[in-house]
Amino acid sequence: MTGEFALIGRLRRLIESGGPGSPDLLVGVGDDAALWRFGDRVVASTTDSLVDGVHFRLDIAGWADLGWKALAVNLSDLAAVGAAPRFALITLGLPPATPAGDIERLYGGMLDLARKSGTVLAGGDIVRSPVLTVTVAVMGEIELAAGTDWRSRVLLRSGARPGDLVAVTGSLGAAAAGLKLLLEDPAGAGARAPALVYPRLDVAPILVGAGVRTAIDVSDGLVADLGHICEESGVAAEIEAGRVPVHPDAALLFGPEALTLALTGGEDYELVFTGSEAVITGVAARSPVPVAVIGRILDGPAGRVRVLGPGGAELRLERAGWDHLAGDDP
Amino acid sequence: MTGEFALIGRLRRLIESGGPGSPDLLVGVGDDAALWRFGDRVVASTTDSLVDGVHFRLDIAGWADLGWKALAVNLSDLAAVGAAPRFALITLGLPPATPAGDIERLYGGMLDLARKSGTVLAGGDIVRSPVLTVTVAVMGEIELAAGTDWRSRVLLRSGARPGDLVAVTGSLGAAAAGLKLLLEDPAGAGARAPALVYPRLDVAPILVGAGVRTAIDVSDGLVADLGHICEESGVAAEIEAGRVPVHPDAALLFGPEALTLALTGGEDYELVFTGSEAVITGVAARSPVPVAVIGRILDGPAGRVRVLGPGGAELRLERAGWDHLAGDDP
């Protein structure tokens, strides 16, 4: 089958040519969340679906962790557009033999994150399915002071300009390292579920306040996600491998290979963003988490991301990141 | 496993006791859509998921019909709260071998209804899944004139009062009759896909304007769905079987058995509503589709719905309607 991104491109053209439009649709298909204007409010909506055996394995994650994660990946998309969460709709596809206690544990994990993030669980759907599936749709809000232009308060994929620096919050590679450890030695001492990630909802408003206009969350992998920014912005980018903040646990466990995990592993849910040197300096000064400048935006083929090694030579990566329709299992 | 409605009850208590609340949540779990206040606007959100082999069969429906239906069931929930559609998020779970052309046909059917209803397709998610799944989340708006109380412009499940009449739009049983025909004789002359249903988005504003405050759409089955109204309103109801508008095709095909299909078959997507005699008369005068009074709301055990036969004796039904987690296949 066609890859995820090619298929999304085809469907996007179909929707843009054959669907109804609306002046209230501020941002549609192609960003981390859709933005819609309701009167003087801007609402951000996004949805993400997790399928057993594709996006998680219950023998690794457990029900409560799955509930947390299903909401977390959606809140991360809200953070990536600069929106604050308001409410969520939860859809469960349940195999016939699912014990009610397990479903309550799933909701328990989800409610932990709901409380921490102030997300109200407002409804949803429960259906029978041969495979366990958890689909969450979240609605957030772009917080606007009266008279503020919404464009100055959002983070989009489409705002990167040649000359901008590329920066990332926190560190990368821990999620991929944890998964690799488990898959290679399921009974090993280090084989436990990866730590739960709290999405960068706290850092996103700092980015917005400092003047950042362009961001994405690292879900598919750093190179792939920066590629999405470049695609939507019509620019290219270069990353200096030596400046990528590799998570210390990943480095300890996998040595030089940890760089590859940080570049392509995905599921770190950090924010990658671009801006002028002054803007990035402003973010670094205010951010509660480390901010690393890792590269720059260039005039070049839309979507191209090159990774430069120590001597300035381009590193070849086997893959840029995670394609949800490709054949590689998690 | 626990049935759908028992499970939803358990999860609802978990959410209400352990989740964060918000004064902006006007209506949460337990109605056709969640209602949320964004400034001076009221937004209605709902989601419904269709799973291959559970809610549809591609050998019967075809890809375009599936796309139409996946959006239609959600728009029907918006109609049932009196909301006008604004935008939708589409999540597809796709088996690896799904041809891109089939997915485009699915989107084609969905876009037909999107155009007809003015629903903007604003985003979504595409994931790999062992079973084809289509999950739609729609956002609608309760249209309020300035200064209007939102409570006077919505249709909820919780507003039925003893003495109210129970009425229904259109006729019932066609969807169940069509499915029965197909399952009994897949190669028969009548064995074709049921006609596509356009949700009652056009009739809902007439209900609201005439003063109706209580409604639900017939998705699970007339008796089951009226039961949901009675449950949320803390009342009971009686239906007179002889007054139920059985679809003429169902009556022609199945004779007296058509009444059972009309009472319990589901998927008709008509609106069942309650109100005083004056209110119902007002609806009937303005509605572009027939409106039939079929029974009344009573003081009695919350959720109990009795169906009375010709002599006033109670009819016994094998089941009230469709439980999405029960073992009965479509």
Image (cartoon, coloured by chain):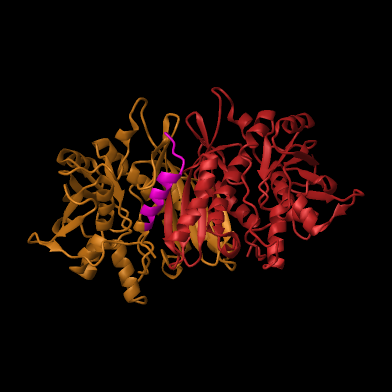
Chain colours: A orange, B red
Residue A152 is covered by the magenta coloring: no
Query: Which residue sits at x=80%, y=36%?
Result: B163
Q: Is residue A284 above or below residue B152?
A: below
Front-lying residue, B6 or A154: A154
Front-lying residue, A218 or B19: A218
List x then y, in percent, for residue B86.
Answer: 50, 39
Residue B53 seen: no
Query: Which residue sits at x=21%, y=55%?
Result: A304
List x then y, in percent, for residue B212.
Answer: 69, 33
- Secondary structure mainly formed by the magenta segment: helix
Q: Is residue A180 above or below residue B291?
A: below
List x then y, in percent, for residue A42.
Answer: 41, 35
Residue A9 is covered by the magenta coloring: yes
* Residue at the far left in the pictured view: A311
Q: Start and end of the magenta stretch?
A: A7-23
Query: Which residue sits at x=54%, y=60%?
Result: A93
Q: Is residue A165 above or below residue A5?
A: above
